[in-house]
Image: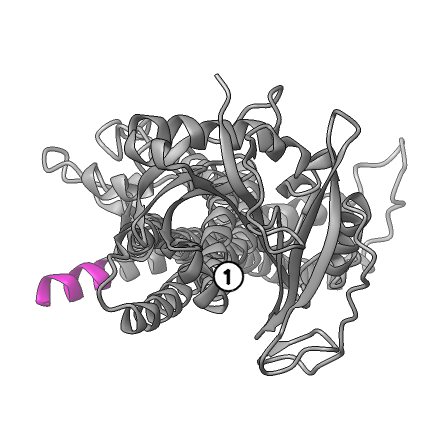
């Protein structure tokens, strides 16, 4: 079934960052004005949008011909219908700078009155399809960095106003014709009343797909003698600048939340790498005794904070074994020395974890930045809505208030929850690094001590052997027997060599006993200090 509507309108509110320093590609800050020019061509609009250059940081009209009384540029063009006929359209273009961004408010419409000031005829609702040639108004075509909002308006006849069951169907038809019959249309998100006229909102704000925010506002006409007007239409014109700001803040909130979902995925990827790295650390075999540090095959799916709910490996920033009371083993007797492979693994983790930790911190910082953006623009939205309510004190603006009272709060709470989940585990990397560094330092100290003992033993052995050898060598030159002679007994040199070797080995053994004795004395001393404490 088709319907006829009166004075159909299309309003585009598109927003684009003036400068995007974070973009890897060459950023086109003139995009909105170029897209506006392309739309002008499709509707045979002859005017040119002349933009003046202004300094960033303020809200200012950008049209060169703009005055305080009129900040927009009046437009006139035509819609090409399927019957090869053309319908006259008018409109207005309003380019703005809003602080750090550019905004384009563009309205195209079939006028309520013709050039002779007579009321225009109702048109078929299919005309909305002609308002969007080549999908020129869609987000995929405009491609603005901060998104956009579309408002489709139409006046209902008296009969249509009386039948509330038709409103939703007419709104759906407007969307279907404007967006095209062959593509998937955004879902209805909410419906309500605004300035005593039904309004329908399409597009799910937290949708992971391209967000197509479309409003269909069906005006209730009022006849007062020869005057034909609609309260909603009058208020849309009256608060047009406020609506631009409302949609600007709204789109910044939506875009920040969508960016936060990307940041969530990036953070979670680093988070998984940290989990995997720590899991590998946990599974490096440190202890031989079966009573120590069991159940390392734990479920990490609930986050690294689950470590504290099981047998703890990280305690007071150190990895310590859980010693069974039955065998009363000491840590020093239980922990075996790290192998070269294990030591290399730990050193590898020490090089990986700080990089992951830095990346994790950067993502968390970016994540929190989006929460702040949402909170800031929600406050701005609320203030702008308050200003409208102040001027229209008797009007119910709940349809617009749902965004700042429900949607944006849910967005902020979701990010806060995600941040709490990730931030709770951010300290685990520091603990892991401290633990690994402690193990490596202990192992290095043990190896240094072992090397020191080896040098000491060799020093005592070779030193003692050298002394004995020196004494013996003093008498070798007094013996006149050839070094090798088959007719004589062996030269005493061989005896002195053997005696020197025996002496060296003997002194090395003595050095070993001295070293072990020192080690035993150190252990006894530590045990006594521990007992006294």
Residue in the picture at 55% in, 48% down: 119
Q: Is residue 531 visible?
A: yes
Q: Is residue 368 visible?
A: no
Residue 418 placed where, x, y %?
A: 35, 48
On the image, which quarter does residue 305 sit in?
A: top left
Classify mark 1: helix, strand or loop.
helix
* Colour logic: one colour
Residue in the picture at 57% in, 43% down: 344
Total label count? 1
Residue 252 placed where, x, y %?
A: 49, 58
For the residue carrying disc 1, how many other residues have a C-alpha within 10 Å: few (<14), some (14-19), or many (20+)?
Answer: many
Residue in the picture at 55% in, 23% down: 184
Residue 441 placed where, x, y %?
A: 46, 57
Residue furthest top in the image: 1
Residue 290 placed where, x, y %?
A: 26, 27
Relative side of 48 to 174, left or right: right
Residue nearest the observer in this picture, 352 or 333: 352
Residue nearest the observer in this picture, 212 or 479: 212
Relative side of 134 to 526, left or right: right
Point out the stretch of residues depicted in magenta. 524-533
Q: Is residue 525 magenta?
A: yes
Relative side of 171 to 210, left or right: left
| Residue 388 position (above or below residue 419) | below
Q: Is residue 102 magenta?
A: no
**Residue bearing mark 1:** 248
Relative side of 30 to 194, left or right: right
Looking at the magenta stretch, what is its main secondary structure?
Answer: helix
Q: Quadrant of the C terminus?
A: bottom left
Residue nearest the observer in this picture, 252 or 311: 252
């Amino acid at each position: 079934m088709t319907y006829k509507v009166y004075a159909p309108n299309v309003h585009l509110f598109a927003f684009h960052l003036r400068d995007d320093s974070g973009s890897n590609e060459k950023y086109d800050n003139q995009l909105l004005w170029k897209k506006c020019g392309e739309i002008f061509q499709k509707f045979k609009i002859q005017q040119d949008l002349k933009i003046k250059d202004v300094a960033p940081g303020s809200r200012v009209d950008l049209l060169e011909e703009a005055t305080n009384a009129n900040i927009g540029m009046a437009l006139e063009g035509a819609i090409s219908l399927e019957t090869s006929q053309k319908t006259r359209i008018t409109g207005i273009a309003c380019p703005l700078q809003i602080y750090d961004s550019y905004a384009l408010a563009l309205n195209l419409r079939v006028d309520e009155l013709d050039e002779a000031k007579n009321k225009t005829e109702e048109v078929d609702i299919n005309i909305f399809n002609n308002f969007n040639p080549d999908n020129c108004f869609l987000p995929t075509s405009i491609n603005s960095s901060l998104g956009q909002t579309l408002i489709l308006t139409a006046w209902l006849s008296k009969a249509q106003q009386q039948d509330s069951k038709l409103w939703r169907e007419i709104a759906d038809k407007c969307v279907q014709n404007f967006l095209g019959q062959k593509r998937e249309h955004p879902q209805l998100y909410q419906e309500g009343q605004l300035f005593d006229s039904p309004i329908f909102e399409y597009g799910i704000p937290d949708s992971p797909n391209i967000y197509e925010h479309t409003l269909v506002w069906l005006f209730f006409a009022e006849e007062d003698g020869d005057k034909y007007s609609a309260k909603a239409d009058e208020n849309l014109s009256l608060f047009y600048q406020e609506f631009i700001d409302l949609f600007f803040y709204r789109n910044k909130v939506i875009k920040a939340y969508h960016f936060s979902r990307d940041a969530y995925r990036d953070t979670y990827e680093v988070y998984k790498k940290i989990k995997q790295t720590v899991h590998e650390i946990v599974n490096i075999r440190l202890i031989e005794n079966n009573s120590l540090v069991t159940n390392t095959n734990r479920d990490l799916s609930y986050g690294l904070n689950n470590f504290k709910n099981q047998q703890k490996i990280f305690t007071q920033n150190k990895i310590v074994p859980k010693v069974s009371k039955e065998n009363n083993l000491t840590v020093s007797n239980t922990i075996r020395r790290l192998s070269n492979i294990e030591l290399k693994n730990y050193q590898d983790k020490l090089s990986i974890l700080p990089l992951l930790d830095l990346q994790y911190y950067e993502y968390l910082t970016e994540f929190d930045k989006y929460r702040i953006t949402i909170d800031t623009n929600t406050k701005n939205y609320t203030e702008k809505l308050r200003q409208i309510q102040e001027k229209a004190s008797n009007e119910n603006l709940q349809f617009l208030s749902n965004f700042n009272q429900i949607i944006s709060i849910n967005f902020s709470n979701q990010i806060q929850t995600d941040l709490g989940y990730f931030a709770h585990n951010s300290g685990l990397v520091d603990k892991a690094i401290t633990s690994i560094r402690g193990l490596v330092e202990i192992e290095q100290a043990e190896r240094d001590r072992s090397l020191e003992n080896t040098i000491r033993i060799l020093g005592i052995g070779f030193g003692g052997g050298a002394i004995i050898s020196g004494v013996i060598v003093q008498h070798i030159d007094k013996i006149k027997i050839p070094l090798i002679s088959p007719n004589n007994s062996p030269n005493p040199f061989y005896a002195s060599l053997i005696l020197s070797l025996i002496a060296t080995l003997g002194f090395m053994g003595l050095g070993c006993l001295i070293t072990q004795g020192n080690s035993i004395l150190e252990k006894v001393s530590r045990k006594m200090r521990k007992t006294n404490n």
